[in-house]
């Protein structure tokens, strides 16, 4: 995947199970020199109720830290090993033994991602993909793990020849016979699923004159009717996912399930990149989490509760920035109803925290009217402790709406146990992972 550098963000979301609902996981990349230890990361994930994580390698420290955590793990066999895994069964056997069997079942490895977006890999390993999938699966059979662990490979939406309207979804013609048909047949025979990386941002950015931002961000909108099947879509994410479902159906593989292994929205981009902002990233990710956790599939597959992995747990400060040409990708924060950030808002400072503690602060970009309304709710019906921000009290200074709202929002958030949706206030607040401080006011961490 081609990456780009954005702000440094840390994911913290509290996820609670819903009956008949989908599932949210996170991507955990580690090409950085400023990340917490794997042990602390696992503590953080557990404290926030995150049940799934996807890693881009098989680092022993990470897999050991995840052991006995109960968190389901998807590991990755990197693109550079595809050719070896495809050519030599002995290589696949050894790789599975050292990177999977040695950790299972203490580490709940549920899937192996064989390569990542192979079709856009500049090293051209496309023809090695299906043989590698088969050899890795044979290795799982050898160690009697095939009934526990699925094998698949994440594909980018650039693998589609057509994605609009959704009903016309089709795979690129040159990939159908050599790759997609045998890969989908393999997924069917092994009971696995297609892994897809979907980023609606790039479709919106390229077509912002005809795609509304509300439609891209899961906000209220009149919807778009697919002329091919008559279905009405209320968000771009569902439309993209159904384009992939339609492409599979066109090849007679409409029984194959799907997992969205990456999705997100950029918090910052180049000057010419329309829609890349912190507020929009917060809206996309928060609304997506709510949409997935409240259940229900897509218009084309209404019973297909989705598993979605948000990108990403951390922004990786050592990841190279590459040109974005044929396929666009991002690094973005992900949230469960909130924006998640390390810095506090304007006028404040931060104190480092690696304990997994989180706080709630006001989103200064939301506007005074919205902030004031949210502040009034928090201090009134919300029963936040707003005494410290009264005149003469310890947190009255600085006497700004943003500072006072931040204190009130955090009080409400902490009292509610930091659960999902309690640091939202209709987009007026977001979570930070370092202790905010406005003037001499220290924010509480619990009640």
Image: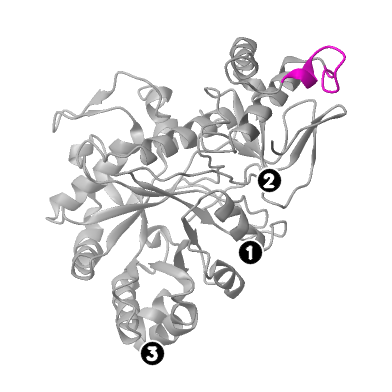
For the residues marked 3 and 1, what is the alpha-carbon distance in whole angstroms?
Answer: 30 Å
Q: Is residue 207 magenta?
A: no
Q: Which residues are magenta?
A: 386-398
Disc 2 or 1, which lies upstream in sequence? 1
Farthest-out residue, bottom: 90
Pointer 2 and pointer 1: residues touching (CB < 8 Å)? no
- Residue 242 in view of the camera: yes
Q: Is residue 218 above or below residue 254?
A: above
Disc 2 or 3, which lies upstream in sequence? 3
Q: Is residue 241 left or right of residue 34?
A: left
Q: Provide the secondary structure element on which disc 1 rests.
A: helix
Q: Is residue 164 left or right of residue 424?
A: left
Q: Hey, which quadrant is residue 409 in on the image?
A: top right
For the residues marked 2 and 1, what is the alpha-carbon distance in whole angstroms?
Answer: 16 Å
Q: Provide the secondary structure element on which disc 3 rests.
A: helix
Q: Comparing marks 3 and 1, which lies closer to the viewer?
A: 1
Q: Residue at x 50, y 47 (%)?
A: 324
Residue beneath disc 3? 90
Q: Mostly what secondary structure, the magenta segment? A: loop
Residue 30 placed where, x, y %? 61, 61
Residue 427 placed where, x, y %? 54, 24
- Residue 114 in view of the camera: no
Q: Report the disc number at residue 38.
A: 1
Residue beneath disc 2? 357
In this view, the residue in front, 27 or 415, is 415
Disc 3 or 1, which lies upstream in sequence? 1
Farthest-out residue, top: 369
């Amino acid at each position: 995947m081609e990456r780009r550098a954005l702000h440094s963000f840390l994911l913290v979301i509290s996820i609670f199970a819903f009956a008949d609902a989908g599932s949210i996981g996170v991507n955990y990349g580690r090409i950085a020199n400023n990340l917490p230890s794997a042990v602390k990361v696992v503590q953080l994930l557990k404290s926030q109720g995150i049940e799934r994580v996807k890693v881009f390698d098989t680092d022993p420290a990470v897999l050991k830290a995840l052991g006995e955590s109960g968190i389901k793990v998807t590991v990755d066999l990197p693109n550079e090993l595809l050719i070896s895994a495809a050519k030599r069964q002995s290589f696949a056997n050894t790789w599975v033994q050292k990177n999977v069997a040695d950790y299972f079942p203490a580490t709940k490895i549920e899937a192996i991602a064989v390569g990542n977006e192979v079709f856009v890999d500049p090293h051209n390993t496309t023809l090695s993909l299906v043989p590698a999938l088969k050899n890795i699966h044979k290795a799982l059979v050898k160690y009697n793990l095939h009934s526990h662990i699925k094998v698949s490979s994440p594909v980018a939406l650039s693998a589609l020849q057509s994605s609009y309207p959704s009903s016309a979804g089709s795979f690129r013609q040159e990939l159908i016979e050599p790759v997609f048909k045998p890969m989908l047949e393999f997924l069917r025979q092994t009971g696995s699923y297609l892994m897809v990386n979907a980023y609606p941002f790039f479709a919106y950015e390229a077509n912002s004159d005809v795609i509304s931002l509300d439609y891209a961000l899961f906000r209220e909108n009149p919807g778009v009717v697919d002329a091919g099947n008559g279905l009405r879509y209320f968000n771009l994410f569902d439309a993209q996912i159904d384009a992939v479902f339609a492409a599979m159906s066109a090849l007679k593989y409409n029984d194959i399930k799907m997992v969205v292994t990456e999705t997100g929205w950029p918090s910052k981009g180049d000057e010419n990149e329309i829609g890349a902002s912190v507020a929009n990233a917060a809206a996309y990710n928060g609304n997506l989490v709510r949409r997935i956790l409240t259940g229900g599939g897509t218009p084309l597959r209404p019973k297909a509760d989705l598993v979605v992995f948000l990108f990403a747990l951390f922004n990786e400060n050592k990841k190279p920035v590459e040109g974005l040409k044929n396929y666009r990708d991002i690094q973005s924060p992900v949230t469960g109803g909130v924006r998640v950030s390390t810095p506090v808002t304007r006028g404040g400072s931060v104190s480092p925290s690696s304990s997994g503690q989180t706080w709630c602060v006001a989103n200064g970009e939301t506007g005074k009217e919205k902030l004031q309304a949210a502040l009034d709710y928090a201090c009134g019906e919300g029963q936040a402790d707003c005494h410290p921000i009264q005149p003469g009290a310890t947190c009255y200074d600085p006497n700004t709406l943003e500072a006072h709202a931040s204190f009130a929002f955090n009080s409400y958030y902490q009292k509610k146990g930091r659960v999902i949706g309690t640091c939202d206030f209709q987009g007026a607040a977001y979570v930070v992972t370092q202790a905010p401080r406005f003037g001499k006011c220290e924010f509480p961490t619990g009640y």
